[in-house]
Image: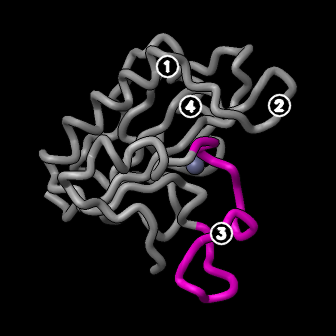
Amino acid sequence: MRFIDRIVIHCAATRITQDFTEEQVKESHIARGFRTWGYHYYIRKDGRIVTMRPIGQMGAHAIGYNAASIGICYEGGLDALGKSADTRTAAQKESLLKLLHELIPKYNIKFLSGHRNLSPDLNGDGKIDSWEWTKQCPCFDVYTEYSQEFSKYQLCYQWVE
Ligand SMILES: [Zn+2]
C-alpha cells in the first residue's frame, strides 16, 4: 500500500447543463495521455459515487501532488454559459461529505485541499491567494465548506510544497 495522507478535490469543468459520464472521463484522460481515468472517485450529478482507480494506485489528477493523495472529482463545475461556478447538486454535496467522512479516518488524512489551492505560491508568502490560482477547480472553497465539519481531525487546508 502506498503512503496516503491527503485528499484533493476537483470538478470535471463541464457545464451543469450537460452530462459527463464516467466513460467520458476515461476517454478524456486517455486522450491526455493517461493510462486510464486519473481520479479515484467520481461523483455524478445524481450523487452516484463511481470508483475509478483503486486507492492503492497513484492517481493522475494534480501534478506534483499525486503520490500521497486521493483524487475526488465531481461532475460539473461550469454554469450553463461555461463560467466556473459551484454547480454541485444537493445529492453531490451529500455524497462528497459521506465519502470524506469515510476516507479521512480510514487513511488518517492530514491534508484536504481543492485543486486550485495547490497553485504555485508566486510571492512566497506561504499562502495561495486567489490571484495565484492557475485554475478555478473545484469552484468552491474547501476550507469554508469543511473546516467546521472535520474540525476534530485538525486537517491542514492549505500548504505549500
Ligand atoms: Zn482539478
Q: In the structure shown, which secondary structural element does the residue marked by tag 4 occupy?
A: helix
Q: Nearer the viewer, mark 3 or mark 4?
A: 3
Check disc 4 and report the residue beneath it.
25
Q: In the structure shown, which secondary structural element does the residue marked by tag 3 occupy?
A: loop
Q: Nearer the viewer, mark 4 or mark 2?
A: 2
Q: On the picture, is 70 further left or further right than 15?
A: left
| Picture residue at 12% right of the left edge, 45% below the top | 106
> Label 3 is placed on what type of residue?
Asp
Check disc 2 and report the residue beneath it.
82
> Label 2 is placed on what type of residue?
Gly
Q: Which residues are magenta?
A: 119-140
> Label 1 is placed on what type of residue?
Arg
**Other residues around mark 3 within 10 Å, as few (<14) / some (14–19) / many (≥20):** some
Determine the CA span between mark 2 and mark 3. Answer: 23 Å
Image quarter (top left, top right, bottom left or bottom right) of the N terminus: bottom left
Q: Nearer the viewer, mark 3 or mark 1?
A: 3
| Picture residue at 45% right of the left edge, 41% below the top | 145
> Label 4 is placed on what type of residue?
Val
- Can residue 94 be seen at all in this image of the molecule? yes
Which percent across, then down, holds residue 44?
49, 19
- Asked if the residue at tag 2 contacts the one at tag 4, i.e. Cβ–Cβ closer than 8 Å, the answer is no
Q: Main secondary structure of the magenta part?
A: loop
Check disc 1 and report the residue beneath it.
44
**For marks 2 and 3 on the same chain, the one whose residue lies earlier in the sequence:** 2
Q: In the structure shown, which secondary structural element does the residue marked by tag 2 occupy?
A: loop
**For marks 1 and 4 on the same chain, the one whose residue lies earlier in the sequence:** 4
Q: Can you name the residue that lies furthest to the top here? A: 46
- Asked if the residue at tag 4 contacts the one at tag 1, i.e. Cβ–Cβ closer than 8 Å, the answer is no
Check disc 3 and report the residue beneath it.
129
- Asked if the residue at tag 4 contacts the one at tag 3, i.e. Cβ–Cβ closer than 8 Å, the answer is no
**For marks 3 and 1 on the same chain, the one whose residue lies earlier in the sequence:** 1
| Quadrant assignment, res 80 | top right
